[in-house]
Amino acid sequence: MRILLIGDIVGKPGERIVTRALPGLRKRESLDLVIANAENAADGSGLAPSIYRKLIAAGVDCVTLGDHIYRRSEIAGVLASADNIVKPANFPATAPGKPWCVVKAGDGTPVAVVSLLGRVFMRPVDCPWAAADRVLAEIPTEVKVRVVDFHAEATSDKQLMGRYLDGRVTAVLGTHTHVTTADEQLFPGGTAFQCDVGMTGPHASILGRRIDRVLETTLSFQPTQFEVAVGDVRLCGTIVEADAATGLATAIRRLVLTESDAEDLAPAAAPTTTPLM
Ligand SMILES: [Fe+2]
Ligand SMILES: [Fe+2]
């Protein structure tokens, strides 16, 4: 079976390339399950319920988030009611959302999805390693395919989580830095790993935001509006192939789609001219 994790979706450009490309991409890549990190989907920070619904309608099966999870407070209702969206499992129990979920893939395989947050250069949270142990013990044993989105800043932490969970989960894939790393690999125990699957949004930017605004604030120390950029929109993610019977990964591959790739995958537009009678 094949699982795609789409990296941090940033703003309207990110949402648009996902909704344009995904139905065709699912077919082209024979995807059984699509997970998307949508922590930056609402104007670059947080996720609004309306965007969540659009992503699901476009073919996203499960949504993960990150440090910006509660930036749009209205998402709390979705986090409480929907069974295909998770909060970081190392957030306190009182924080809205579920620490893990199980979604059914297209081939019928149940897949557990877990999100964990790193602690280096990030707001302090509970120990991600202890949280991983706790959550993996809670997931029913018959759910063999398990995907971890490790939303963290430090590549060293990400490698450590990958090695810690090697053989116990299908994949440990990183998000949060918005920069794709070229280290995708299969670990000896059968876990697919990559430090960061990258950003889905405008790459003519600083991590998805307008270059001029970030530069102005950096040089002048005066706050500006870090608006979402517009140029060079790409969909970045990683596809993991897994054996549904064992839950172990058999292949991992990076995926990048440009806007023109997305248009090639998009359904043909309906004719706009009225045929002559
Ligand atoms: Fe992000
Ligand atoms: Fe983040």
Image: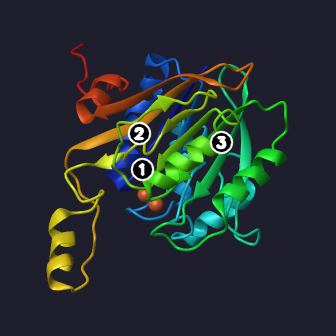
Examine the rendering and report whether any part of residue 37 can be seen: no
Image position of 205 with respect to 217: above or below = above
Q: Are marks 1 and 2 in contact (CB under 8 Å)?
A: yes
Query: Of discs 1 and 2, which sits in the foreground?
Result: 1
Q: Residue at x 57, y 50 (%)?
A: 64
Image position of 214 with respect to 37: above or below = below
Where is residue 173 shown, x and y percent of the image?
52, 42
- Circle 1: residue type: Ile
Label disc, if present, on residue 99 of the rendered structure: none
- Circle 3: residue type: Leu
Label disc, if present, on residue 165 of the rendered structure: 3
Q: Residue at x 64, y 29 (%)?
A: 189
Label disc, if present, on residue 18 of the rendered structure: 2
Q: Is 177 or 256 nearer to us in this picture?
A: 177
Q: Are marks 3 and 1 in contact (CB under 8 Å)?
A: no
The quadrant of the picture showing ligand 1 is bottom left
Q: Residue at x 79, y 32 (%)?
A: 143
Q: Could you give the CA–CA distance between mark 1 and mark 2, rounded to whole angstroms? A: 8 Å
**Quarter of the image where one finds residue 214:** bottom left
Where is residue 274 shown, x and y percent of the image?
25, 23
Q: Could you give the CA–CA distance between mark 3 and mark 2, rounded to whole angstroms? A: 29 Å
Mark 1 or 2 closer to N-term? Answer: 1
Q: In the rendered view, does 269 fall on the left or right side of 185?
A: left
**Quarter of the image where one finds residue 220:** bottom left
Q: Is 78 or 38 nearer to us in this picture?
A: 38
- Circle 2: residue type: Val
Query: Of discs 3 and 2, which sits in the foreground?
Result: 3
Q: Regarding mark 1 in the picture, which secondary structure is present there? A: loop
